[in-house]
Image (tube, grey):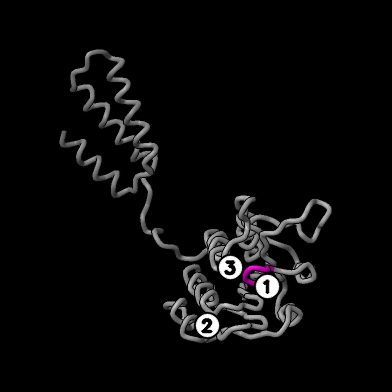
Amino acid sequence: MFMIQIVFLEPKTSGNVGAIARVMANFNFKNLILINPKCNHLDENALRRAKRAKSILEKAQILKTIQELKLISDYVVGTTSVLGRDYNISRVPINAEEFGKKIADIEKESPELKISILIGREGDGLANEEILECDFLVTIPTFPDYHSMNASHAASIIFYEIFKNMNYKKIGEHIKPATKDVKDQIMKLVKENLKKMKFATEEKRETQIKVWQKMVGKSFLSKREAMALIGFLKKL
C-alpha cells in the first residue's frame, strides 16, 4: 500500500511537532516519524498545538538516525530552502508544485512504495552529509532576502501540493461550478433584458453586454449561484 511518512529531524520545540501533526491531519497524512528528538512530543505544548491531531503524536515512531529511516523507506525526500549552484548536484531541488505532481504519478505507477519526506532541524535544516542521504530535494520558492520558513509553515505548503494532486476527498468538491451552457443562458437573458431598455446609443448597449460578459466570466459562479441569477433575470 502506498505510504507517505512525514519525518522531522531532531526537533527541539515540542510546539513545532504539534503544529506539524495538526497540518498533517489537515491534509490526510497519518504517519509521523521523529529522528533523535530533543523534546517531548507528548508534552502539554505539543498536544495543545496539535488540536485534534493528538492521535498522530501518540502513534509517532521514534528513530535514531537517517540510516534507520532509509531501511523503512523506498525514497527519502529532503526539504531545503538553501540551494546550491548548478554544479552542486546534491543541492539542486525540484519545487513543491512539481513534487506534488510527481508523488501523484508515483502512486499510480507504484502503489506499493513508501515515501519519506524529511523536514530538517528548526533553524539549521539539513547538513550536507544528510542531504547526500536523500534521493532528491524539494524546495519552496520564497523571497531571496528571507528564504527560511518555519518548519510547520513549510510543511503545510508541501503537504498541500501533494494533497491537491492526490485522489482524496476535499472540502468544496460538492460545490459544482457553472458550465458554459449555463453561462450562455445567463448572457442570453441579459441580452433579452437589455433590448427592452432604452440607451442613448447602441454603443452603450453593447458596452453593457461586454461588462456582463466580463462579470460572468470572472466570477467563477457556482451552479447554484448561476441558477439563482437566471431566476432573477427571468423575472425582470
Q: In the rendered structure, are the residues bearing label 2 and label 1 in contact, judged by CB atoms less than 8 Å apart?
A: no
* Image quarter of residue 232: top left
Magenta stretch: includes residue 122: yes
Q: Please, is residue 55 above or below residue 141 in the view? A: below
C-alpha gap between disc 3 and disc 2: 16 Å
Q: Quadrant of the C terminus?
A: top left
Q: Mainly helix, strand or loop, the magenta region?
A: loop
**Residue located beneath label 1 in the image:** 113
Q: Which badge, 3 or 2, comes first in the chain's sequence? A: 2
Q: Quadrant of the N terminus?
A: bottom right
* Image quarter of residue 70: bottom right
Q: Please, is residue 177 above or below residue 30 in the view? A: above
Residue shown at 75% from the left, 67% from the top: 135
Q: Nearer the viewer, mark 3 or mark 2?
A: 3
- Mark 1: which amino acid? Leu
Residue shown at 68% from the left, 85% from the top: 63
Mark 1 crowd level (few <14, some 14–19, many ≥20, 10 Å Cα): some
Numbered tag placed on residue 57 in the rendering: 2
Mark 3 crowd level (few <14, some 14–19, many ≥20, 10 Å Cα): many
Q: Which residues are magenta?
A: 121-125
Q: Please, is residue 179 above or below residue 10 in the view? A: above
- Mark 2: which amino acid? Leu
Magenta stretch: includes residue 176: no
User: Could you tell me which secondary element the residue under label 3 belongs to?
Assistant: helix
Numbered tag placed on residue 74 in the rendering: none
- Mark 3: which amino acid? Ala
C-alpha gap between disc 1 and disc 3: 25 Å
Q: Position of residue 105 (x, y in %)?
A: 64, 60
Mark 2 crowd level (few <14, some 14–19, many ≥20, 10 Å Cα): many
Q: Which badge, 1 or 3, comes first in the chain's sequence? A: 1
